[in-house]
Image (spheres, grey):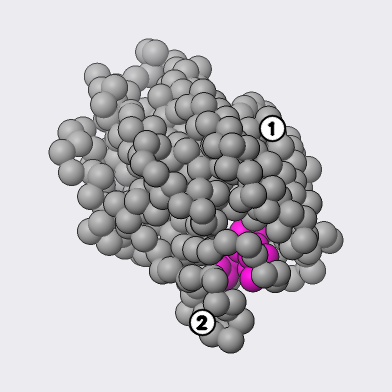
Amino acid sequence: MHILVTADTLGGVWTYTRELVTGLVRRGEQVTLVSFGDIPTAAQARWMEGLKNLDYRPTAFKLEWMLDSEPDMLASAQYLEALIQEIKPDLLHFNQFYYGSLRCDVPRVVVAHSDVVSWWMSVHKKEPPETEWLRWYRQIVARGLSHATAVVAPSRWMLDQVELHYAKPAFGSVIYNGRTALLFNPHISKEENIVTVGRLWDSGKNVGLLLRQELPAAVRIVGCDRHPELQSSVFAVEDIPPNVRLDPEQDEKQLVQTLARAGIYAATSQYEPFGLAPVEAALSRCAIVASDIPSFRELWEGAAVFFRNNNPKSLRDALESLLRDPGLRQRQANLAYRHARQHFPAERMIDGYTNLYQTVVPARAISA
């Protein structure tokens, strides 16, 4: 089967795409990958080296959630339509809503990784203000969903959000994201510290919660602090407590080492349709402290210590309970590790998608 996959390079979708595309190619599928957003760095693209049957087409078109993106969306859709005419894929796998309504007669899967309205509702607890841009955004999301052969979400919670804010898909399913356990190191000595990974400018990630109370251990916050459109830092130096360290984005090798040594991972999100970073931390045998939001309950029930969403005191209490009891911290780390290995392996995710592909693409339609 020849599959055209779209991705963006600015967040977890790129990591998800790596796992999916690598798995598909190694199973003998032919993949054409098109990325949007920034052109990836050499380090970001290194995973493609040596993968046969992969044709990669990087572009720098804006993403649909960015303001003033409509011209770029029109241009990128035209680019994709021309590419489809050229390569004639059997299936389209879109990681953006917009392209679900491309003008072509090819089955298409649309994956709902996140969306602006559910993000706003989770962060602000109210409907977003109506603007011309938001009306356009709602329209293109609903249109993409309605034209999809199948819609996938990485959690039941996210699929429910799609149905609530836009439209009920004709065929909707949940496939949990996955990571390759062998990429991480769960076997070295841990430090008594707290780590989180996330975009500092994203209120949904809510990593600033770690700055709102003095915490009982050293804290490392790893992630970009500059908004991709505004290019301005979200924290002033005087806002940072002395036991908190802000690190820029790390490459894979650095992040593996950071998580391998971390005792506790703080999943502080107010909005998280799935969250690959907690999975990576669990595969590194970190104890998980997670915000009590519906998606984390769905994904981590029984394998994480939960704190009240957006409550700095509750977060501190949860962290202290693990820091003062090394035995409990070790038990929670082992629970998280086993849970991630069982529920979020890359192979399970790839099985889910290949089974779905076979459902939406008739065998007789697959090109030789």
Q: Which residue is mark 1?
A: 301
Occupied quadrant, residue 9: bottom left
Q: Position of residue 348 (x, y in %)?
A: 46, 23
Q: Position of residue 70 (x, y in %)?
A: 54, 66
Residue 203 lies in the magenta stretch: yes
Quadrant assignment for the N terminus:
top left
Q: Tell me the mark number nearer the camera, choosing from 1 and 2.
A: 1
Distance from disc 1 to disc 2, alpha carbons, whole Å, reads 37 Å
Q: Residue 232, labelled with which disc? A: 2
| Total labels drawn | 2
Q: Amino acid at mark 1?
A: Glu
Q: Can residue 11 be seen by looking at this rendering?
A: yes
Q: Amino acid at mark 2?
A: Ser
Of 36 and 313, the residue lying toward us: 313
In magenta, the rendered stretch is: 200-211
Occupied quadrant, residue 130: bottom right
Q: Position of residue 118 (x, y in %)?
A: 72, 53
Residue 340 lies in the magenta stretch: no
Q: Position of residue 42 (x, y in %)?
A: 23, 59
